[in-house]
Amino acid sequence: MPHSGLLGEGRIKVMTYNIRYAGDEKTEGLNSWKNRRELVASVIRFHSADIVGLQEALKNQLDDLTDLLPGFRWIGVGRDDGKEGGEFSAILFREERFEILSTSTFWLSETPNRPSRGWDAAFPRIVTWAQMKDRQTNKAFYLVNTHFDHRGENARIQSAKLLKAIVAEIIGESPAVITGDFNFRPQAEAYRILTGRGDYNFTDAMTVSRHGHYGSTITFNNFGGSNEEGNRIDYIFIKNAVEVIQHGIISDAFNGRFPSDHMPVLAEIVLR
């Protein structure tokens, strides 16, 4: 399959993918990371993703993916200690194409500059961002990747407000792509905060894709155990001078097996 650079100069394929943490092999069985890692890597490879915002990735999973995907590397820190502990909201990218100009991580909490759990969240939640330069076009942009809490509704609302405020401060008027497992549906208050309230709104890439939306409207599948229509909780948002060419939710399964309990979301974008 041709690399996206051959399909049009400057086009970038961005994916958001909750790959599910590597649980205990005895309890996870067929869904253990050992039995899924090559499937996850093959989805990224086959769909020619250039940048992937990963959620729930543990350090060993990130190392496995870079082993299975030569030419990719990742950046980010673990949410538990700001080093290697716990889940990462890492950014995986093609090293030959993109240069990292700056990067950092903050916590979705009342104390964003240090490891912490915010509001009514069940776990610490983080945002990893990077200012990147596309070597094809020499254009700089930001990639912001996050994972909102799955239990705390107030945490999701406050996280949406904090995310908008900090992103506005960091990126200003620069082009940006925001990826993540946001754990809310489009009807939720937190979605409205991100996309339709205040002076610094994000745009849901699905709603502005030049060629419309491809595929499912479900992103959480529970390894095939849940196919509830409209259960879309993973998103790619854009801000400022970003055009969306295509947008899709990839529901690939391998002989009935899903690589993760989430579907990846893919958007092909151009920096204007």
Image: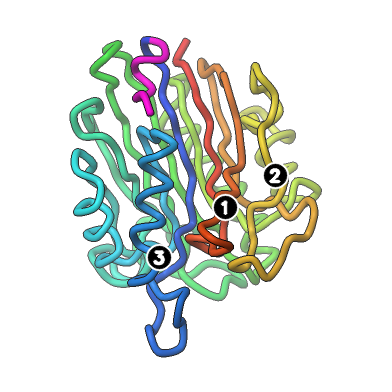
Whole-Å distance between the Cαs marked 2 and 1?
9 Å
**Looking at the image, is mark 1 or mark 3 nearer the viewer?**
3
**Amino acid type for the residue under numbered disc 2:** Ser
On-image quarter of the N terminus: top left
Q: Looking at the rendering, which quadrant does residue 82 occupy?
A: bottom left
Lower sequence index among marks 2 and 1: 2
The residue segment tinted magenta is 1-8
Residue at screen point 32% across, 37% down:
130
The residue that label 2 is drawn on is 216
Q: Are marks 2 and 1 in contact (CB under 8 Å)?
A: yes
In the rendered structure, find residue 154 and report the number of the disc placed on it.
Answer: none
Q: Secondary structure at mark 2?
A: loop
Spot occupied by residue 84 in the image (x, y as percentages of width and height): 24, 67
Count neighbours of disc 3 (C-alpha within 10 A) and say few if under 14, some if 14 to 19, many if 20 or more: some
Whole-Å distance between the Cαs marked 3 and 2?
21 Å
**Amino acid type for the residue under numbered disc 1:** Met
Q: Nearer the viewer, residue 199 or 258?
A: 258
Q: Secondary structure at mark 1?
A: loop
**Is 158 above or below relative to 14?**
below
Lower sequence index among marks 1 and 3: 3
Spot occupied by residue 260 in the image (x, y as percentages of width and height): 50, 62
Q: Secondary structure at mark 3?
A: helix
Query: Is any part of residue 211 visible from this angle?
Result: yes
Q: Nearer the viewer, residue 195 or 247?
A: 247
Q: Looking at the rendering, which quadrant does residue 7 occupy?
A: top left
In the rendered structure, find residue 36 and report the number of the disc placed on it.
Answer: 3
Lower sequence index among marks 3 and 2: 3
The residue that label 1 is drawn on is 263
